[in-house]
Amino acid sequence: MAGSVTEVNDANFEEEVLKAEGPVLVDFWAPWCGPCRMVGPVVEEFAEENAGKIKVCKMNTDESIKTAQKYGIMSIPTLMVFKNGEKVAQLIGAMPKEQLTSNLSQYLD
């Protein structure tokens, strides 16, 4: 995983995401999910290109069931943007980098 992406789980989600300063993008994924494997590199590129503007995290939904259920993750990949502890955006499914960047640009600090 790229150095600009933080791995989160049920235990550290509150500290890493909800208490973070500035916007946080969370990629909810699972290793068996084909579309997740397609969008993973796109999310990592986005993280590198926007370092300092948005924190990017990945959460394996197989390992962090509690948080996935809390946020109603029914389909993966699901990308959520949090700001000041609140969910402000949600994107579902794999998408090209241009679409991801376009959808998330308004949340960059």
Image (cartoon, rainbow, N blue to C red):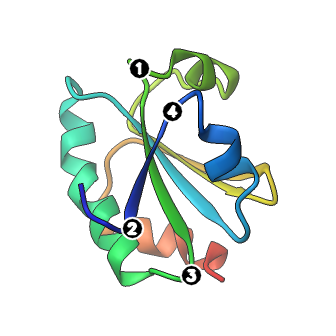
Secondary structure at numbered mark 1: loop
- Using the image, determine if residue 65 lies above or below residue 101: above
Image disc number at residue 103: none
Q: How far separated are the C-alphas under marks 4 and 2?
A: 27 Å
What residue is shown with label 2?
Answer: 99
The numbered mark, 1 or 2, whose residue comes first in the sequence reads 1
Which residue is rendered at x = 61% and y = 60% of the image? 24
> Which amino acid is tagged 4?
Asn
Under circle 4, the secondary element is loop
Looking at marks 4 and 2 on the same chain, the residue that comes earlier in the sequence is marked by: 4
Using a 10 Å C-alpha cutoff, classify the residue at mark 4 as few (fewer than 14 neighbours), some (14 to 19) or many (20 or more): many
Residue 12 location, x and y as percent?
A: 59, 38
Q: Which residue is mark 3?
A: 53
State the image quarter where residue 88 is shown.
bottom right
Point out residue 58 in the picture as x, y percentages from the top left corner: 42, 46
Q: Nearer the viewer, residue 76 or 20?
A: 20
The quarter in which the N terminus is drawn is bottom left
Does 21 sit above or below residue 85? below
Marks 4 and 3, how far apart at CA: 22 Å
| Nearest to N terminus: mark 4 or mark 3 | 4
Is tag 2's residue or tag 3's residue first in the polypeptide sequence? 3
In this rendering, would 38 be left or right of 102?
A: left
Residue displayed at 66% across by 83% down: 109
